[in-house]
Image (cartoon, helix red, strand yellow):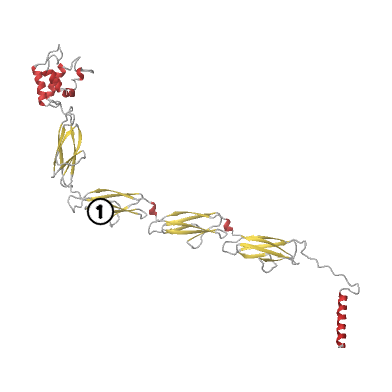
């Protein structure tokens, strides 16, 4: 027990003395040394770089960095390992952080962006297209790119070439790609179309009917195409020929095809009719009676006589055909006449209805009126007696009853006026003869 107490006392004193010595207890000792200074304090490291851009999809960009503000620099990019060179290659499009570290471990950093130069270019492609015909390979595309330099051209993924002209093309869609000196690409689609789609070809024809019986082959088609050049012609599925004239045709429907120099085709249907009238010699002749000019309605007539066939119907001035060949109540004029036979064959002509001459009894009465009544102060001039001017034929006709009442039946002093000689019995009889004949201008 005594041994344990002595040992514990000894150890306590030992540690106590040790602590006092360390803390300077019991003596003066040495002062605490100052901290080590930071070599980066007050030091500014800057990083600059030269950037070489890349092309979209490729990793050919680079950053060459250099640092200032200290010495013995090493460099890293985007947190990678430090290297003695500030050059970093094989870079794609993106933003990169370069850290420069000097010999004392002091650092500076800066960010740099590798761009795609193609994004700031406005490359365009224009082209001239030469179309082709169906089944041909005579089309071409001549493409021209702008917006950069050093262009080469490719069609539909083929090899690039120095020229933008591509020939020997058939109808179809083609993609032209232009690549400049930086590898920047621009594509444009062009269509080589059927050259015929831009043309408007038409066919007209002069037709000659066949006949007069079924099976007659004396019809013809003479076709002419327009809207292009170098036409040849085909009838139905026959051989093409240089002319559009096709003869010896029976009645029927035919397809005429016109083909131009580019093999563009246009087909038109034409019908050769059966004409039952071919070979017939129809005749038509009119007989006319004149028109009485003083009649309130037409008094002329046309009688049509037709020959060369049977069962004729007749027509005047395009009106309805009728079975009668007589047309009445016509004024003086020229009329179109037609006769149509049993087969529908038509013969046309003209007929003229003239104004009828004055009749003999009217002529005698007019002479009496001019001699005895159409005299000064009576039925003549601008203000004739009773408003009746007997120098006018139709006034005499319309006044027949007044003339009879005054000159034949009435007081002799009425007509002619005194002191002129009165009408003779013979003149009065002439008036009565005219009235009995119908009292018309033509009587």
Residue 265: percent from the left, percent from the top? 34, 54
**Quadrant containing the N terminus in the rendered view:** bottom right
**Residue farthest along the right direction in this orientation:** 27
Q: Quadrant of residue 43?
A: bottom right
Along the viewing direction, whichever of 164 and 58 lies nearer the viewer: 58
**Quadrant containing the C terminus in the rendered view:** top left
Work out whether 262 lies above or below 27.
above
Work out whether 319 lies above or below 22.
above
Residue 418: percent from the left, percent from the top? 15, 12
**Residue farthest along the top direction in this orientation:** 419
Along the viewing direction, whichever of 62 and 230 lies nearer the viewer: 62
Dot 1: within a 10 Å radius of its alpha carbon, few (fewer than 14), some, or many (20 or more) residues? few
Work out whether 317 lies above or below 190.
above
Q: Quadrant of residue 399?
A: top left
Tell me how many marks there are. 1
Work out whether 63 lies above or below 291.
below
Q: Is residue 188 left or right of residue 114?
A: left
Residue depicted at x 16% and y 24%:
397
Residue 274: percent from the left, percent from the top? 20, 50
Regarding mark 1 in the picture, which secondary structure is present there?
Answer: strand
Q: Quadrant of residue 39?
A: bottom right
Q: Is residue 269 left or right of residue 292?
A: right
Residue 421: percent from the left, percent from the top? 12, 13
Q: Which residue is mark 1?
A: 253
Q: Is residue 376 left or right of residue 98?
A: left
């Amino acid at each position: 027990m005594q041994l344990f107490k002595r040992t514990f006392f000894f150890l306590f004193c030992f540690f106590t003395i040790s602590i006092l010595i360390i803390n300077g207890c019991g003596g003066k000792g040495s002062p605490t040394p100052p901290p080590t200074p930071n070599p980066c304090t007050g030091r500014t490291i800057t990083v600059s770089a030269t950037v070489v851009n890349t092309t979209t999809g490729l990793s050919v960009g680079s950053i060459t960095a250099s640092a200032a503000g200290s010495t013995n620099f090493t460099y890293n990019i985007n947190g990678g390992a430090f290297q003695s060179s500030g050059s970093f290659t094989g870079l794609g499009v993106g933003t990169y952080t370069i850290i420069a570290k000097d010999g004392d471990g002091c650092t500076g950093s800066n960010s740099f962006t590798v761009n795609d130069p193609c994004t700031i270019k406005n490359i365009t492609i224009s082209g001239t297209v030469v179309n082709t015909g169906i089944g041909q390979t005579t089309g071409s595309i001549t493409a021209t790119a702008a917006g950069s330099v050093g262009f080469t051209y490719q069609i539909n993924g083929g090899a690039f070439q120095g020229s933008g002209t591509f020939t020997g093309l058939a109808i179809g869609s083609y993609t032209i790609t232009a690549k400049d000196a930086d590898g920047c690409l621009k594509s444009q689609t062009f269509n080589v179309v059927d050259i015929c789609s831009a043309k408007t070809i038409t066919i007209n024809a002069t037709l000659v009917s066949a006949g007069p019986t079924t099976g007659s082959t004396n019809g013809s088609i003479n076709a002419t195409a327009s809207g292009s050049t170098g036409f040849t012609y085909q009838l139905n599925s026959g051989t093409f020929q240089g002319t559009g004239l096709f003869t010896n045709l029976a009645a029927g429907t035919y397809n005429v095809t016109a083909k131009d120099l580019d093999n563009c085709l246009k087909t038109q249907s034409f019908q050769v009719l059966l004409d039952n009238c071919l070979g017939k010699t129809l005749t038509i002749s009119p007989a006319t009676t004149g028109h009485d000019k003083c009649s309130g309605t037409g008094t002329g007539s046309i009688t049509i006589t037709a020959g060369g066939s049977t069962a004729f119907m007749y027509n005047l001035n395009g009106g309805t055909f009728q079975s009668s060949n007589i047309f009445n109540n016509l004024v003086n004029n020229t009329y179109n006449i037609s006769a149509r036979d049993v087969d529908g064959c038509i013969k046309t002509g003209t007929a003229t209805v003239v104004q009828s001459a004055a009749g003999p009894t009217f002529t005698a009465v007019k002479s009496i009126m001019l001699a005895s009544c159409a005299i000064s102060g009576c039925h003549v001039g601008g203000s004739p007696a009773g408003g009746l001017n007997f120098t006018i034929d139709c006034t005499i006709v319309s006044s027949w009853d007044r003339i009879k009442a005054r000159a034949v039946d009435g007081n002799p002093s009425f007509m002619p006026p005194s002191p002129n000689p009165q009408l003779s019995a013979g003149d009065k009889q002439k008036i009565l003869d005219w009235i009995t004949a119908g009292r018309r201008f033509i009587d």
